[in-house]
Amino acid sequence: MSNDRMPDLLAESLTDAQREAAAAFRAERGVPVFGPFTPLLRSPEMMQCASRMGLYLRYRSALPLRISEFTILVVAREWSQQVEWHIHHPIALKAGVAPETAQALAEGRRPATMSADEALAYDFSVELQRHRAVSDPTYAALVARFSEQGAIDLTGINGYYALLAMTMNVARTALPEGAPRPLPTLTP
């Protein structure tokens, strides 16, 4: 018995708005509704807005893909979001995040193997996620490297993936069948 509160909706139970949103999602992304978009489909317009924002943040932001994917792992760890980690861990590795860097994140440790750009993104993201603000030195260093647009895009990645993590944590979105739990439970 799954404890997934918002599993896939049956096609015959979709409202017209949900059916249209699911079709638009498939047309835009080339895949059916999945992962965080499954619970978001309960609010079809929100799902479509979130999907469009996600496409921008992943593929058209001012940040390199490696930094975006690294940041997604930081957020997934901060929110202990198994599905987000499961989806993005292989993408992050393919984008150039070192396996030992990802492993340290999974274990809740500051990675010793981060690149300078990853360290900037890590500091910015951890400060934002844990303290709800970013210090002047961290902000200045990030802007010097990635510009003000980079700071806004990195803020967007943090906020967007926190939204997805919160959504899946509320919905208790299940990992795909047979997938191991990739993130260990952290003790305070």
Image: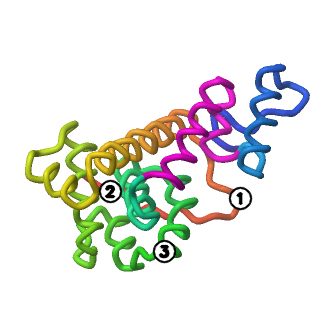
- Name the amino acid type tagged 2: Leu
Task: Out of 173 and 1, give the one closest to the viewer.
Answer: 173
Task: Out of 82 and 58, give the one closest to the viewer.
Answer: 58
The answer for how far apart the CA atoms under marks 2 and 1 are is 23 Å
Q: Residues within 10 Å of mark 2 (few under 14, many from 20)?
A: few
Residue 138 image offset from top left, x and y in percent? 14, 53
The residue that appears at 75% across and 30% down in the rendered structure is: 21
Residue wearing tag 3: 93
Q: Which residues are magenta?
A: 34-61
Task: Out of 33 and 108, give the one closest to the viewer.
Answer: 33
Q: Which mark is residue 82?
A: none
Residue wearing tag 1: 177
The answer for how far apart the CA atoms under marks 1 and 3 are is 22 Å
Q: Helix, strand or loop at disc 1?
A: loop
Residue 5 image offset from top left, x and y in percent? 63, 33
Instruction: Confirm or deny contact between disc 2 and disc 1 (CB under 8 A).
Output: no
Residue wearing tag 2: 186
Dot in front, 3 or 2: 3
